[in-house]
Amino acid sequence: MLTSHLRTLLAALALLLLPACGSDDDQPSTPPGGSGALTVNLAGLPAGLPAAVRISGPASYAKTIGSGQTLSGLAPGNYTVSADSILSGNLSWSAATPVQNATVAADSNAVVNISYSGSTLALAVREVANVSGAVFLTAPSGDTRQFIVERSGRILVMQDGALLGTPFLDIRNRVASVGEGGLLSMAFHPDYARNGWFFIYFTDAANNIVVERHSVSSANRNLAEPSAVLEIIRIPHPGATNHYGGLVSFGPDGMLYLATGDGGGAGDPQGNAQNLNSLLGKMLRLDVADSRGAQPYVIPPSNPFVGQSGRRAEIWASGLRNPWRYAFDGDRLYIADVGQARREEVDIAGVKQAGLNYGWNTMEGTLCYNAAICNKNGLTLPAFEYDHGNNNVNGCSITGGFVYRGKAIAELAGRYFYSDYCGGYLKSFLYKDDGVTEQASWAIADIDAIQSFGQDGDGELYLIAAAGKVYRIVRAPKA
């Protein structure tokens, strides 16, 4: 069995080995070792818009290029040139012939010409389920089922488009759904296929935030084992019945993350978000690899406040108001933090950036919330924000989503999607070179009160409305 220290070292090494994002030209996986050449010519793309052309060939040769060029030193043989569709705003650029083959001979130059044309990419939504109280959707990686979390305390399984009659889990007798509470999310362990562990985030009758580990039944993979329950953490949330946060998730480092609200009430009256001795208004990071009754979690040694008096070592980040939904994407973390009365924000940071303070309740977005103590020193301001506007014309409560990594709409790769409970829209942006770009609004059917996104085992995205309808985001048919 690995020690906690060794697990942490391995997790840190895994982060260091994460591939860099946004590289225009990747190095070949194997030196080609030949005298042939291949020229790839690109035409039809707007100036400055990089392509995504993949070349593969003999001896496991693999390279991705973003512009036309000649590849030299190639071994003789057959090469495959694949041009992915790319997106700029709402315009999709596709190659007339997405896949071409070229034969490279010694001391000669083969040529492949790729011609692009643009068209407007339109998205639509397709209703896939109607579950009263639906609040989240997820699945283990690669699993064809969808697991729908019901706020009252059940988790339902949807298989081949139909809801199974027996819930995967039913803990309604232990869940209190008063105010913004209830069973709010679930997360499958990265090694779920082997250990069968999944984790849930809910509020109990005493108004506490509770995270538990459960196990799937060995006899029926569509049912949880009712007796296999381990409480991971219980966080007191006295007083108000709002601002619980609500998401539990595993990061790329294998650690368990949970984002808690500030305890509720307008303006964080208890000052929890800036209090490093409180677990409210925080992002927490726990090691649950060897969870057991006597020790449900271990503090990762790389957590920023380990060994510091008066500061809880579970804390990874602070200064959050109500981070209802957040998402990991490779080496980045996107936190959608619900604002007070003026601004909604998305905080974006590297997954290894520990101890960040996102500013609440000193700041609301980039605005001073508490003018008496409005000192921005040491605060991490949002990467993206929007103002509510008059009569909440732009929205009132951000609903954070995910970065698209599915296969059905390949042009959307890397776009972060979000909505708003009052706005009812679907929007996205691309985070590149430490900035937000290519903001886009997608014309979809009117959906009232979008309260959550979901992501299935193939990376496809879903919208969940407060009325309980669950929609899959799809490519709109061509007119």
Image (cartoon, rainbow, N blue to C red):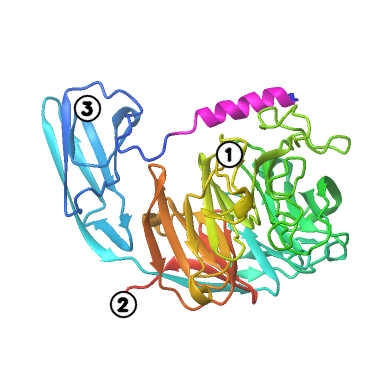
| Badge 1 amino acid | Pro
Image quadrant where residue 46 sits: bottom left
Q: What span is in magenta?
A: 4-19
- Image mark for residue 252: 1
Residue furthest toward the front? 372
Residue drawn at the location 52% of the way across and 70% of the way down: 395
- Distance from Cα at disc 3 to Cα at disc 2: 44 Å
- In terms of sequence position, does the residue under pointer 1 or pointer 3 come before the other? 3
Counting from the top left corner in percent of width and height, residue 398 is at 56, 63
Which is the main secondary structure of the residues drawn in magenta? helix
User: In the figure, is residue 457 to the left or right of 73?
Assistant: right
Quick check: 323 above or below 11?
below
- Image mark for residue 479: 2
Counting from the top left corner in percent of width and height, residue 178 is at 80, 69
- In terms of sequence position, does the residue under pointer 3 or pointer 2 come before the other? 3
Q: Secondary structure at mark 2?
A: loop
| Residue 458 visible in the shown view | no
Residue drawn at the location 21% of the way across and 22% of the way down: 34
Nearer mark to the viewer, of 2 and 1 = 1
